[in-house]
């Protein structure tokens, strides 16, 4: 029955005529035009599916998760605002429009992270996310201006056309791409602006699933695939992109191995997977044997984005269910033995874990293969990528072993019971996605199937599977039956002290700026302008006061002297 | 194009409805948002089908 | 018959006396009188210039100077009326007409 309805809707849409591009003029100043336009083709189709599908499931999940919340209306308004902004990013046919919606997702992310604003940490995290994103967005804006300056257009199609004519300065293009990439660094939380994402986990868990795992943070990757033609011609910026992605993937995975908060682990895992995607897209500009990988690379990155959206949203929603069941306990060392109490949730979570680790034939296996095939063009990055794959399997196994097996380590875990059916539906749907999304039929049903790179032969997939299995085995045996972290590594648990370093840097910088501002205020504004002016008037007044004797004849005398002076001056001037 | 614009603007209308009319009825706002998301999803599914027909 | 110079000398003398009175005397009524004297000096000078304005010891053709003198006399009369009224009012409020005691304008 559902299928029949579906067909009807399809027919309806087809009859009304479907045009994949259209725009109207929004701003027109001299020769500068700004359009609000829609461009929907290629990867955009996959992205819009990810957005609306995950978005809908998260709405559904939220109905259960936020049932008792006082700010429910505010929360759902935020979700809808996010859906609007994210759709805008996907649809945008020019950089300026994309930037507007880019900021809008930032705002909705801010609103949703700070949903429980009375909690100090949540308010702080929201602020941090917004400010850190601003840094990246500033670069993005400069990038857009550079592009506009060198091509005179911000429309993707037009820029591509102009670029194909070959009339551009390569150095400038490199800088433009780098600046645009700054936007992706901020939004997709790459090193060194990754610090906001783990903190953003203060928001409600469904929000983390939607915004901080599946869609918004992937917007950076999506944006890079949109400006692929620029990256192809900017080899220097492209290698920056690759290495930033690889470094993010590596250090985020390292940090994930030592976190104790279930959502934080998933957050770092997201960071590291985003690093993968960015790295793959960066290969678009690699000239291997005089050939750019181009679309192949971005397809690999996007493919991973697409599969990752399913299993990571599933992981987050699963963790949301666990947190909900455990009375808002988030520390994994206070859970345990949940597999017996929450059968469905545990099952879906384990499937998603396997998908993330890259186990055949789940979706993650295919997308990881695609990325590694691309990364194989630079051995160093291939090694980093493989190591990250090992770490991924390792920390996810650690999480699962501690949370689902062993004995319950607190009363909240003992009392946990399966979540309501409404919340299970999204989990099950996403499980189907996590299993099948990697298959070609599922992907090409949506995205007009382009060449997703597949490894040649079975060597690479076998090695990757072996690495994943090794990670799982290591994680299983190291953490089986433990009640607390057996191998604490401070530097990883403290996230390489990056937050602290940033704090110090920010404080130093802020103090310096404050000192300069204070000096300017004290000396120039206060001393010279405000008090200086007042003092000048006082001094002149003191001199002139002497003339105000109150003596009538004195006045008459001065008046006479004045008249004589004026007469003399006039005479001198004329004479 | 029209469909795409509907997908784009529907959530915005949901926000407006939530904020303006239904502030006092939290459940309603939740349902409206969810409904808008559902409609967007259905439209998207139709959208892709139409497009891939064209492009293939 | 006196010459122009003698008239001018007389006018100047009157003006100087009036100026001295304004500058030196402290009684406001005397100052007012001195002012009137200075006006008279100016009038005298004007009339004198008219009388010898025609050249060859003859008076000038037009009567502009005479008219002006009449104006000055009229205005001076009005000024004296107003001035004295102000002085009366001043005396009522301050019980003095000595300018040395009227120093409230001192800064």
Image (spheres, coloured by chain):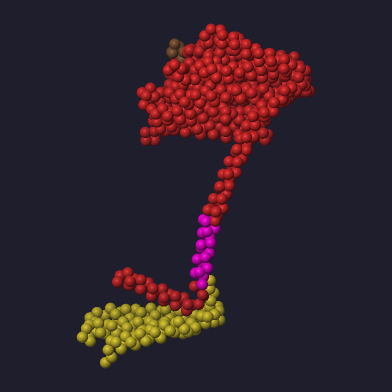
Chain colours: A red, B brown, C yellow
- As rendered, which of A286 and A29 lies closer to the eye? A286
Say above or below: C35 vs A57: below
Q: Residue furthest bottom?
A: C1
- Kindly identify the residue that appears in the image at 60 percent across and 38 percent down: A505
- Kindly identify the residue that appears in the image at 37 percent across and 72 percent down: A566
In the rendering, at what x and y percent does residue B46 appear?
Answer: 50, 15
- Kindly identify the residue that appears in the image at 60 percent across and 44 percent down: A511
Say above or below: A247 vs A548: above
Camera sees residue A198: yes
Q: Which residues are magenta?
A: A528-546
Is A539 covered by the magenta stretch?
A: yes
Tell me where residue A233 sits by quadrant: top left
In the rendering, at what x and y percent does residue A325 appear?
Answer: 72, 21
Magenta-drawn stretch, dominant element (helix, strand or loop): helix
Is A135 covered by the magenta stretch?
A: no
Say above or below: A174 vs B50: below
């Amino acid at each position: 029955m559902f299928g029949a309805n579906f067909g009807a809707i399809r027919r309806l849409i087809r009859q009304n005529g479907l045009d994949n591009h259209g725009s109207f003029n929004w701003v027109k100043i001299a020769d500068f035009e700004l359009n609000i336009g829609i461009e929907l083709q290629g990867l955009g189709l996959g992205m819009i599916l990810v957005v609306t599908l995950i978005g809908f499931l998260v709405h559904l999940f939220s109905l259960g998760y936020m049932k008792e919340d006082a700010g429910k209306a505010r929360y759902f308004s935020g979700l809808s605002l996010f859906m609007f902004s994210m759709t805008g990013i996907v649809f945008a046919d020019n950089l300026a429009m994309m930037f507007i919606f880019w900021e809008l997702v930032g705002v909705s992310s801010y609103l949703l992270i700070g949903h429980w604003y009375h909690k100090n940490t949540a308010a702080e995290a929201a602020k941090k996310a917004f400010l850190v994103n601003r840094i990246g967005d500033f670069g993005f804006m400069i990038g857009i201006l550079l592009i506009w300056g060198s091509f005179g257009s911000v429309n993707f199609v037009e820029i591509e056309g102009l670029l194909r004519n070959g009339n551009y300065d390569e150095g400038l293009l490199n800088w433009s791409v780098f600046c645009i990439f700054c936007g992706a660094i901020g939004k997709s939380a790459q090193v060194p602006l990754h610090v906001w994402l783990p903190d953003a986990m203060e928001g409600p868990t469904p929000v983390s699933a939607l915004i901080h795992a599946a869609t918004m943070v992937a917007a950076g990757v999506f944006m890079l695939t949109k400006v692929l033609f620029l990256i192809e011609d900017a080899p220097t910026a492209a290698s920056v992109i690759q290495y930033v992605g690889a470094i993010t993937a590596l250090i985020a995975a390292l940090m994930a191995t030592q976190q104790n908060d279930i959502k934080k682990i998933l957050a770092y895992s997201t960071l590291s997977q985003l690093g993968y995607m960015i790295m793959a897209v960066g290969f678009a500009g690699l000239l291997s044997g005089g050939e750019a990988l181009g679309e192949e690379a971005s397809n690999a990155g996007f493919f991973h984005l697409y599969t990752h959206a399913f299993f990571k949203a599933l992981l987050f929603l699963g963790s949301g269910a666990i947190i909900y069941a455990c009375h808002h306990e988030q520390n994994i060392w206070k859970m345990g033995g949940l597999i017996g109490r929450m059968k469905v949730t545990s099952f879906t979570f384990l499937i998603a874990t396997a998908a993330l680790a890259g186990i055949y034939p789940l979706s993650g296996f295919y997308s990881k293969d695609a990325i590694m095939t691309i990364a194989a063009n630079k051995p160093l990055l291939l090694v980093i990528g493989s190591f990250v794959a090992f770490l991924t399997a390792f920390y996810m196994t650690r999480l699962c072993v501690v949370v689902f097996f062993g004995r319950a380590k607190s009363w909240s875990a003992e009392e946990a019971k399966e979540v309501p059916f409404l919340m299970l539906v999204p989990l099950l749907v996403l499980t189907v996605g996590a299993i099948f999304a990697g298959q070609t039929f599922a992907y090409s049903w949506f995205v007009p199937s382009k060449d997703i790179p597949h490894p040649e032969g079975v060597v690479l997939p076998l090695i990757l599977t072996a690495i994943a299995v090794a990670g799982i085995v290591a994680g299983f045996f190291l953490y089986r039956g433990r009640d607390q972290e057996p191998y604490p590594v401070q530097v990883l648990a403290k996230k390489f002290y990056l937050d602290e370093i940033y704090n110090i840097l920010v404080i130093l910088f802020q103090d310096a700026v404050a000192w300069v501002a204070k000096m300017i205020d004290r000396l120039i504004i206060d001393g010279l302008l405000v008090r200086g002016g007042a003092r000048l008037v006082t001094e002149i007044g003191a001199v002139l006061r002497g003339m105000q004797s109150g003596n009538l004849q004195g006045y008459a005398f001065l008046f006479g002297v004045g008249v004589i002076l004026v007469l003399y001056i006039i005479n001198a001037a004329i004479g | 194009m029209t469909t795409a614009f509907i997908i784009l603007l529907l959530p915005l209308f949901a926000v407006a409805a939530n904020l303006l009319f239904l502030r006092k009825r939290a459940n309603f706002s939740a349902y409206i948002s969810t409904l808008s998301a559902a409609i967007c999803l259905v439209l998207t599914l139709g959208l892709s089908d139409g497009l891939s027909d064209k492009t293939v | 018959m006196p010459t122009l110079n003698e008239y001018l000398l007389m006018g100047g003398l009157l003006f100087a006396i009036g100026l001295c009175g304004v500058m030196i005397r402290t009684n406001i009524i005397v100052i007012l009188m001195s002012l009137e004297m200075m006006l008279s000096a100016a009038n005298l000078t004007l009339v004198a210039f008219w009388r010898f304005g025609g050249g060859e010891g003859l008076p000038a053709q037009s009567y502009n100077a005479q008219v002006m003198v009449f104006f000055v006399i009229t205005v001076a009369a009005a000024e004296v009326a107003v001035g004295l009224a102000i002085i009366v009012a001043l005396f009522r409020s301050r019980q003095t007409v000595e300018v040395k005691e009227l120093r409230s304008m001192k800064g």
